[in-house]
Image: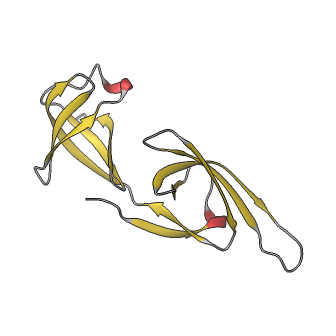
Amino acid sequence: MGGEVKRKIATAFTKGNYIVMDGVASVVTDIQTSRPGKHGHAKCNIMAVGMVDGKKRQIVVPGHDELETPVIEKKNAQILNVNGDMASVMDSETYETFDMAIPEELKSEVKEGVTVVYWLILEDRVMKQIKTG
């Protein structure tokens, strides 16, 4: 399955960027860079929230460290059936079938036969929107 990442220097991250923290794809909510004396290295204090679990995480790293940023694949899938908060879907390219949680904001629109856009982030699949047109 997914799991593709790219590397990026710590000081290049900004608020809203995606980062892999503790093995979890997260969104940077705040970053502070401190510049120490002449011979020290800048330190980055990065705060982020997990994209799937919603947990807050924080790391402090030297500014020249390379960190991982997840490669997010945007894919389409067709809803095969809905069972409560879960939907059985079929990927539109690979025809692979799997179950996916339905986000609260899409529950009224997710119905059999509808095509949705989902993101493949590391090992997680997250339904993002209803595909129209």
Give coordinates of residue 17: x percent, y percent: 55, 53
Q: Is residue 72 above or below residue 42?
A: above
Give coordinates of residue 117: x percent, y percent: 28, 41
Q: Is 3 left, or right, of 57 in this rendering? A: left
The residue nearer to you, when weighing 41 against 12, is 41
The residue nearer to you, when weighing 13 against 59, is 59
Q: Is residue 3 above or below residue 77?
A: below
Colouring mode (rainbow / by chain / secondary structure / one colour): secondary structure
Q: Residue at x 35, y 30 (%)?
A: 103
Q: Is 129 left, or right, of 57 in this rendering? A: left
Q: Is residue 70 above or below residue 37?
A: above
Q: Residue furthest front?
A: 22
Give coordinates of residue 120: x percent, y percent: 32, 51
Image quadrant in which you'd find residue 61: bottom right
Image quadrant in which you'd find residue 53: top left
Q: Residue furthest right?
A: 37
Give coordinates of residue 19: x percent, y percent: 52, 57
Q: The C terminus lies in which quarter of the figure? A: top left
Q: Residue at x 22, y 45 (%)?
A: 76
Image quadrant in which you'd find residue 111: top left
Q: Is 95 left, or right, of 85 in this rendering? A: left
Number of marks:
0
Q: The N terminus lies in which quarter of the figure? A: bottom left
